[in-house]
Image: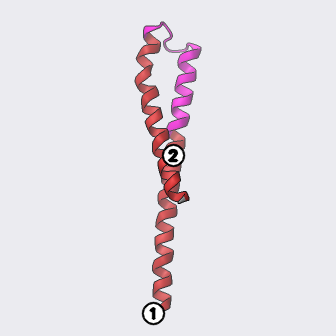
Amino acid sequence: ASVRRALHVGLGALVLAIILEMGSPLLYALGWGNLSWPYEIEVAIEEALELSGWILIAGGLIALALGRASQMDARRTDD
């Protein structure tokens, strides 16, 4: 259950990062381009979401692979 949760939260973080990325043109239209504080905050949040999303997905996939490998080892030792 926790592996599934990590994968779902990671995917959600990536979706939110994409939504923020799509909102960047709105900041430019409002006159808040590069080096303005709203733009820099948007970039920081977007990059943090993207990084955390990939970390959660990678961690979840590693945990899933290790769990499967452990199950296979347990079956081999039972035989």
Instruction: Name the residue rendered at 43%, 21% in the picture.
Output: 23
State whether residue 51 is above or below residue 45: below
Instruction: Name the residue rendered at 46%, 85% in the picture.
Output: 75
Residue carrying label 2: 9
Q: Amino acid at mark 1?
A: Asp
Residue carrying label 1: 79
Q: Quadrant of the C terminus?
A: bottom left
Return the disc, 2 or 1, that comes first in the chain's sequence: 2
Q: Quadrant of the rendered structure where residue 22 is?
A: top left
Q: Position of residue 56 (x, y in %)?
A: 53, 49
- As rendered, which of 76 and 8 lies closer to the eye? 8
Element type at mark 1: loop
Q: Is residue 45 magenta?
A: yes
Instruction: Name the residue rendered at 51%, 30% in the picture.
Output: 46
Q: CA distance from mark 2 to mark 1?
A: 38 Å
Q: Nearer the viewer, mark 2 or mark 1?
A: 2
Q: Which residues are magenta?
A: 29-50
State whether residue 41 is above or below residue 33: below
Q: Amino acid at mark 2?
A: Val
